Amino acid sequence: MTSVCIYFGSSTGFTEMAAEKIYDEFSEGYCEIFNAVDDGLAVVEKFPLIIFGIPTWDYGGLQEDWQARWSEIDSLQITGKYFAVFGMGDQLGYSAWYQDAMGELHGKLIQRGGLPIGCWPNEGHQFTHSRGLTNEGDFFVGLPLDDTNQNELSATRISEWCQQLINEFYEASGVDLLT
C-alpha cells in the first residue's frame, strides 16, 4: 500500500536529489515520487502523507515549475491529509529570503485543510529573515536544506527528518511506514 507521496519542483537538480534521498528513506512500496514539470498537483490527493519539495529562488521567488502549478493549489483536495515540506535555499547569498517559498507553500496547504507535520529547529542556519519559520520563530515549517553552503549536513538532516515524519505520522494516524 503506497502511503507517501513526494512532489517536487527542481531547476538545478538539488531539490530533485533531496527528493530522491527522502524517497530512499521509506520502505519499498510505501512511497511514490512526482516531478512538478511532468505531473499536476492533483496526483497528491490520493495519498494520506504528502511531502512537498520547493526551492526558494533569488529574492524569495518560486521555482518555475512551482510557478506553473501554483494556481492548482487553490483547488487541491487535501483536507485531513498530512503534509510535510522541505525547501532548498541559500542562507548566505539570500539571507533575507531564506526558505521563503517553503513558508508560502506551507501556508497555502494549511488553507486547503492539510495537517502539517515535520517542523525543524532553526539552529545551525544563518539568515536574517525567513517566511519559512513557524509563528514562534524557533522552528522552520519543514526541513530547510542549503546545498550551497551546508551540503555536508543534508544527508544527515534528511535521514533524521524522515524518521521524525515516520514517527509523527504514526502517532497521528496509526500507520507504520517502515513495515
Image: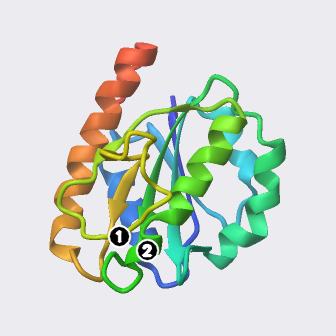
Taking the image as shown, residue 41 lies to the left or right of residue 158, namely right
| Residue located 25% across and 38% down the image | 163
Q: Does 97 sit above or below residue 177?
A: below
Q: Is mark 2 on a helix, strand or loop?
A: helix
Q: What residue type is labelled 2?
A: Ala
Residue underneath mark 2: 96
First in sequence, mark 2 or 1: give its number.
2
| Residue located 68% across and 29% down the image | 113
Taking the image as shown, residue 169 lies to the left or right of residue 63, namely left
Q: Does 43 sit above or below residue 110?
A: below
| Residue 111 visible | yes
Taking the image as shown, residue 78 lies to the left or right of residue 140, namely right
| Residue located 84% across and 43% down the image | 75
Q: Residues within 10 Å of mark 1 (few under 14, many from 20)?
A: few
Q: Looking at the rendered structure, which numbered label has been put on residue 128?
A: 1
Answer whether labels 2 and 1 touch (C-beta < 8 Å): yes
Q: Does 3 sit above or below residue 105?
A: above
Residue 52 x %, y %: 53, 52
**Image quadrant in which the C terminus is located:** top left
Marks 2/1: CA distance? 5 Å
Q: Is mark 1 on a helix, strand or loop?
A: loop
In depth, the one of 15 and 114 nearer the eye is: 114
| Residue located 82% across and 58% down the image | 71
Residue 172 x %, y %: 42, 17
Q: Dividing the picture into quarters, in which one does residue 39 lie?
A: bottom right
Residue 158 x %, y %: 27, 54
Q: Residues within 10 Å of mark 2 (few under 14, many from 20)?
A: some
Q: Which amino acid does label 1 sit on?
A: Thr
